Image: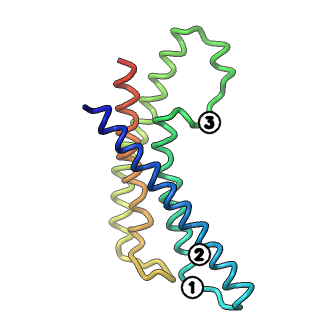
Amino acid sequence: MLNKIAEKINKALHNLCKLLLLIQVIVVSYVVYGRFILNKTPAWGEPTVLLLMVWYSLLSTAIAIRDDAHIRMNIIDMILPEKGLKVLEKVNYLIIFVFSIFMIIQGYKVSVLASMSVLPGLYIRTSWLFGAVPVAGVFMVIALLGKVRKMI
């Protein structure tokens, strides 16, 4: 049951990241077209790409955790014995879990503080930008719980 929910969440994250990347490409293309062909750059273009890039980058970390697609040093795999690797993996998951909780708590606090300001060009609250941090933290915790469940 939980695996099916985790799969649906992962698939939704994948699709959302694809959509965010596609929109980034379209907006950047339009900004370049406007700047060099029309000689008029839309004021909302760069802030939109920044917003999308932040959300894409942070949400994709949860996908990387779940799929083991993050950067790692393989030399350690050759040096440590199997038992040491398992311990190191558990420590790694614990560190990522603690950091994810930190992202949720502190990201929420920063989002609340940022709700007083507005993103230039978009005229939306800056908390939409910083809101990616706690949301990504939640998805990272979900991905980690799935990894730990498979280990047990």
Looking at the picture, does residue 39 appear above or below residue 147?
Answer: below
Q: Helix, strand or loop at disc 1?
A: loop
Q: How many marks?
A: 3
| Residue farthest toward the left in the current orientation of the protein | 1
Decide if residue 92 is on the left or right side of residue 6.
Answer: right
Residue receiving disc 1: 43
Residue receiving disc 2: 46
Looking at the picture, does residue 20 appear above or below residue 58?
Answer: below
Q: Which residue appears at 39% of the width and 34% of the height?
A: 144
Q: Are marks 2 and 1 in contact (CB under 8 Å)?
A: no
Q: Residue 137 location in percent, x, y?
A: 39, 47
Q: How is the image coloured?
A: rainbow
Tag 2: amino acid: Glu
Q: Residue 37 location in percent, x, y?
A: 73, 87
Q: Residue 42 location in percent, x, y?
A: 59, 85
Residue 112: name its quadrant.
bottom left
Residue receiving disc 3: 71
Q: Which residue appears at 31% of the width and 35% of the height?
A: 4
Q: CA distance from mark 3 to mark 2?
A: 29 Å
Tag 3: amino acid: Ile
Q: Nearer the viewer, residue 42 or 79?
A: 42
Q: Residues within 10 Å of mark 2 (few under 14, many from 20)?
A: some
